[in-house]
Image (tube, rainbow, N blue to C red):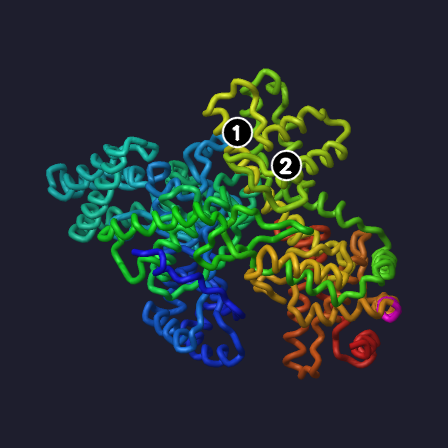
Amino acid sequence: MPTETFPDPRIPVSTYRLQLNRKFRFSDAQRIISYLNGLGVSDIYTSPYFKAKEGSLHGYDIVDHNTLNPEIGTQEGCHEMVQELGKYQMGQILDIVPNHMCITSKENTWWMDVLENGPSSPYANFFDIDWDPVKTELKNKILIPILSAQYGIILERQELQLAFENGAFFIHYYQHKLPIMPKTYIDILHHRIDELKNQLSAENPRFLELLSIITALNNLPPYTEKNPEKIAERYREKEIIKKRLWNLYNESPEIKAFIDENIRIFNGTKGKTESFDHLDKLLNKQIYRLSHWCVATDEINYRRFFDINDLAAIRMEYPGVFTETHKLIFRLIREGKVTGLRVDHPDGLYNPSEYFQNLQRNCFLHKGLGALKNLADHPDNVAEILKQYDDRLLSDPQMKPFYIVGEKILIKGEKIPEDWPIYGTTGYDYLNSLNGIFIESVNVKAFDDIYNRFIKSKINFQDIIYEKKILIMETVMSSEVNTLGHFLNRLSEKNRHTRDFTLNSLTVVIKEVIAFFPVYRTYIQSAGVTERDRRYIELAVSKAKKKNPAMSGSTFDFLKDVLLLKYPENFGDDDKKEWLDFVMRFQQITGPVMAKGLEDTTFYVYNRFLSLNDVGGSPDRFGTPIETFHGQNIERFKSCPHALITTSTHDSKRSEDVRARLNVLSEIPDAWREYLIRWRQLNKKKRVVSEGQEIPGTNEEYLLYQSLSGVWPVEPMDKFEYEIFKKRIKDYMVKATREAKVHTSWISPNTTYEDTLINFIETILSNVRGNKFLRDFQTFQ
């Protein structure tokens, strides 16, 4: 197959993002293609449409990467949408999610298999599970933090229900369905066995079959088995046993009644604590440990997407995982239905550079293979195409044969790594740069003064980031940080010069360095440390040292040496590999801590000018000089001319229209100050003091007035619309105050504060005579 047969990648001119879900399906997208073409759109950019959790509206909670989401449509529906695109020579950029999967749905068969078979599951390595965690009770187990209250309470409320389906036992907890480990079926089947023996007689064939099944269960290899032959035996035999048990259940009324009654007994009786002992003992033998959801912050032993328990990270660094999760993606590329990819959250990957290189290589392969279906039948074609790829890469290391962009958030002049073979980012950097030119930067001091006077305090943006990142690491992500601390402690024990560093000091050092990390993450790998990454690490360590003069500087130096791969003399290959593994895992944590500490916390605390508080933004930088904007565009044209640019994304805190309205405030600081003073005075009697605390606080009140100014509709609202508007404002303010984690939070909601805040909003927005604030506010619009 000659090189000339490979066309250049399709570069989109203008894209339009389509959020597909049960409310907007392939057929709906098909109907608007001609309209989008008329607007000048060259490519649609679709949200993930792989099988997701039932009812998902966004599609990032995938349960099966290789099946289309039936709620969005069928293969035929997808094909018809693509055919419509073809009529107008339009392309499709598909959003893919390589970092994580949803694990709360029983339709995630990989996760269900892990829960049933533990480390011996062929999918155990698909997920980033620590089978030997800090908490010894979780050795070879997985913490499942799905309960709404403490385990014992939930158990004795009968909310955990044992059930029998198709020869297998399960635990149901509302929408959750968890498999029972086959060997522990014995606990259920052996209970009251003597009663059944007396009922049927010891020689009854069906009774003997049940005893045979129990013996077979007892002989199953353990779930910790590592021998491939034994694992295969376990898989084969457990499925045979399930069929035998299901047949026996359906053929024998006595056996059916026996099992049904045992299930009833195991499910306990409300008010009788001891009646739940059977189920408690059964659950304690499972591969998973059920717990209250808040336990996850300290003890969860699988890596998550940020702090979301429902989304478990997958190990894309393993070739088998990459292959299994990309089959449908590559088929769509092979068939010409997908012409570009948008990669979600690459910073969560173990080695993003390696992933992107592997992705480009496979896109080249499958694009070259065309409509061929079974690749195993065409080994010569595959080998020839891959050889062409390798040859081309040697002559052009910057080759990017397929259009790929990454959802990478860049901080203050940061650039995407040079070894990422992608066309750029998804546009957060451009969004914030563009927004900045509409802010009157000369008025920065005026807005500092307005904000500080209103909240009666001075807030330092960088100090808040530090404080909130520490807060995140001590609350919702303490488990991840503690795991890193134990890992670093093991490394320190390998050398007599570092073994005296205590576990506590090492964990503190990790927190402090991450808290001062200036970017989301570094990209160190086995090839070494780039100058870029060295600079970021040295800066973070230097600031952490300065912040903590009472701590030994040598502890900080040790972490710096580890992160910079400064191996001790005579360090063996295995030790180097372990050291590198720590660095790779450290890098996977810094991004989520930054995201949670900055975007999801600080952006709700530092409210000086809300238009700046957006993903990838720098709220402490008041506007973008036009010269800077042009300079950034020139640099963007030189380095990533085909990156996506945007004015809003599905992750934006505020839409373009809201930001545009808020930006006007930067031009009228005097008027803004006067109105704020008047509004605060008009609403003085509507605020409430509870336990010495004024509600809402001054910072929240400032946030509220800005938010109202940004979202107030241009057209008058009727009564029904106004009620909806007020509810949305109330919901937003509760969310914002929980995200800020000052007066309330998601983990520990302060209902008194929230209810009082809601009442305040209702009062100041009540459309009644005598509400001077509302009339005055409307004159400002």
Mark 2 nearby-residue class (10 Å; few <14, some 14–19, many ≥20): some
580 relative to 107, above or below: above
Q: Position of residue 473 (x, y in %)?
A: 63, 41
Q: Which mark is residue 534?
A: 2
Q: Residue at x 81, y 62 (%)?
A: 441
Of 339 and 135, nearer the camera is: 339
561 left or right of 356 in image: right
The C terminus lies in quadrant: bottom right
Is 696 or 251 nearer to us in this picture?
A: 696
Reply above or below: 47 against 325: below
Residue farthest to the top? 496
The residue under the point 51% across, 74% down is: 41
Is residue 277 found inside the magenta-colored segment of the image?
no
What is the magenta range?
670-676
Task: Report the quarter where the N terminus lies.
Answer: bottom left
Residue 491 in picture, x, y percent from top left: 55, 25
Tell me residue 531's x, y (percent). 62, 38
The residue under label 1 is 579
Task: Examine the rendered structure and indicate whether residue 327 appears above or below residue 79.
Answer: above
Question: What residue is at 34 percent from the left and 44 percent from the top?
Answer: 180
Q: Are marks 1 and 2 in contact (CB under 8 Å)?
A: no
